[in-house]
């Protein structure tokens, strides 16, 4: 950086107004487009790079774009790093993941598995979750619904945001293993995921402030019953809508699927003021929330 | 989260195409607008909230919006947190800052000053910087300029991105003190800021790959001479352009000023493929880079 002049509130307002102007075109024509443009399934990696490179040259866009990197930098990728203790390198890897600096990754780097295990089972993960929840609540109070039309909305992701699947990941190496849909579905069907306490508190607080809550999850429609039951048993009630992945959404990335669903919410007249999720794909894309909160999750990455 | 189906490369392409469609309207009409709409300097905080609340209800927008929170959550804000050691709470505060979860803050929370000092003077900060540089370089190689028109660009912020002002912040409590423009300018005029080694390596690597480098800094035009000299002395050469804040930019937030300058770059035909900065305001806004990299900085926050 280096700083500019003063008048911070005036500048905040100017920034808000700037984004207001930008927001309108942003919402137009998003969700239909990528369905038509999506290349056929199974485009081979050998064919794609050229088209890919062409497109990437054309488009200025945010933090979302995931090019197939030549190879992602891993904690131990550099010779210079040899002198750095593993725990420091793994803390760097975790920080880079949370700040969305990493290329898409499929499993926790092997040397960092113990670090991730200690983190998610210890005080730091809980503390990180609690601080993000407190910041979210402070923002919710400041952004308090003013109208009485009941259209102010807060979007919550479910897994690792409202509910914790730690027992499942404990059985699968805390992110060391490649994701296995079938096994995870079996876990989901048990309906035993526990509430993340700070998220439950935040959930109730935003509801009491007058926000409508939308639960937007990558779980599939077939798991609606068990998901409702699990959420209720854990103290989550009175959501406006629980949105699960329909058959037609199955092949979309989370970023695209969730953007489409947020767009539908906007078209129904909701104003999305807050969004809480453990993945950047819960938060980025189009029809984005006025403010987004990234909960920590070093165990997996969803594009 | 919970995951969807397969076909990850196809999905990446679909996502890229979606953003291509979204990118075009995004760039239109940004930079002039907020100049006209910016409220007069010195709008009092007592007057603003209503207008502010009105606007925030209208606009769906990213991670950027900074409402004046009722009060920002601090590491010690919650009674539940008492049992958590200070260092864990401060690590949570730092993580939340890096993931852009915090409300704007003016100084490091007093109890976290020792934590920040130990971090920035120790191995962890260096390791964090190095990992982000390696991820950036991996992406740069994958996004390699293909055309020979010399229009592929990488934007670098200067302070705490290419050059380190640690000696200055060491003399001012590592972020404990409110920012003092005059004192910081005196430091800048000395021209003694040191290169961040991992950033120098990245800078040279992206140049060698064929990117044009743009240095976009909040430093003012009056510091051009000393900034050029300082950068050269530290090994940074052959940039396409060094953009400093002109008198007319002084009252803009960094987000607005830098968005405008990126827009000018695009209008000149450059494709911004990468952007490296230690502040979210280096990276967010409009005319955003295809991919952005957030370098760590727990010492100050620029809106």
Image (cartoon, coloured by chain):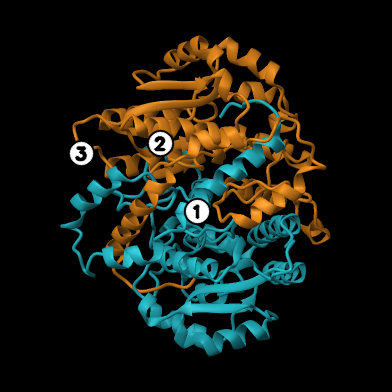
Chain colours: A cyan, B orange
Please name which of the two marks, 2 or 3, marks the residue nearer to the observer: 3
Cα distance between the residues tagged 1 and 3: 33 Å
Identify whether A215 is placed above or below B274. below
Which x, y percent locates residue A122? 64, 63
Q: Locate residue B233, reporting x and y percent.
A: 44, 13
Which badge, 2 or 1, is on the more N-terminal residue? 1
Q: What chain does mark 2 sit on?
A: A
Chain identifier of the residue bearing label 1 in the image: A
Element on which disc 1 rests: helix
Q: Nearer the viewer, residue A114 or A174?
A: A174
Label 2: which residue?
A: A80
Q: In 3D space, how far apart are the residues under numbered discs 2 and 3 (Cα atoms)?
A: 30 Å
Say which element carries label 3. Answer: loop
Badge number at residue A24: 1
Q: CA distance from mark 2 to mark 1?
A: 47 Å
- Do marks 2 and 3 both belong to one polypeptide chain? no
A239 versus B263 height, above or below:
below
Marks 1 and 3 belong to one chain? no
Find residue A88 and report its horizontal and vertical position in percent: 53, 46
Instruction: Answer whether labels 1 and 3 touch (C-beta < 8 Å).
Output: no
- The image quadrant that residue A274 belongs to is bottom right
From what the image shows, is residue A74 above or below residue B169? below
Q: Residue furthest left?
A: A47
Question: What residue would you read off at disc 3?
Answer: B146
Q: Which numbered mark, 1 or 3, is in the foreground of this view? A: 1
Instruction: Identify the residue shown where x is 46% and y is 40%.
Output: B29
Question: Quadrant of the rendered structure where residue B109 is?
Answer: top right
Q: Which quadrant, please, contains the C terminus of chain A?
A: bottom left
Residue A101 in the image, given as x and y percentages of width and height: 45, 47
């Amino acid at each position: 950086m280096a700083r500019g002049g003063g008048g911070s509130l005036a500048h905040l307002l100017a920034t808000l107004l700037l984004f207001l102007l930008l927001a309108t075109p942003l919402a137009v024509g998003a969700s239909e487009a990528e369905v038509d443009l999506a290349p056929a399934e199974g485009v081979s990696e050998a064919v794609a790079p050229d088209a890919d490179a062409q497109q990437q040259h054309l488009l200025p866009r945010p933090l979302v774009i995931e090019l197939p990197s030549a190879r992602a930098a891993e904690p131990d990728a550099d010779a210079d790093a040899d002198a750095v203790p593993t725990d420091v390198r793994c803390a760097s890897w975790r920080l880079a993941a949370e700040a969305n600096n990493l290329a898409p990754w499929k499993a926790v780097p092997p040397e960092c598995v113990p670090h991730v295990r200690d983190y998610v089972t210890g005080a730091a993960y809980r503390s990180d979750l609690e601080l993000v929840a407190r910041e979210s609540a402070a923002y919710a109070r400041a952004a308090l619904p003013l109208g009485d039309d009941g259209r102010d909305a807060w979007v919550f992701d479910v897994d690792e945001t409202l509910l914790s699947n730690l027992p499942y990941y404990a059985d699968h190496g805390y992110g060391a293993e490649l994701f296995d849909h079938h096994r995870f579905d079996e876990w989901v069907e048990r309906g035993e995921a526990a509430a993340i306490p700070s998220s439950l508190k935040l959930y109730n607080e935003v509801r009491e402030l007058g926000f409508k809550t939308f639960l937007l999850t990558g779980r599939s429609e077939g798991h609606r019953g068990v998901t409702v039951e699990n959420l209720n048993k854990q103290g989550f009630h009175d959501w406006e809508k629980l949105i699960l992945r329909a058959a037609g959404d199955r092949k979309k990335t989370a970023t695209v699927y969730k953007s489409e669903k947020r767009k539908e919410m906007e078209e129904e007249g909701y104003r999305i003021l807050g969004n809480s999720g453990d993945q950047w794909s819960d938060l980025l894309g189009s029809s984005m929330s006025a403010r987004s909160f990234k909960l920590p999750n070093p165990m997996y990455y969803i594009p």
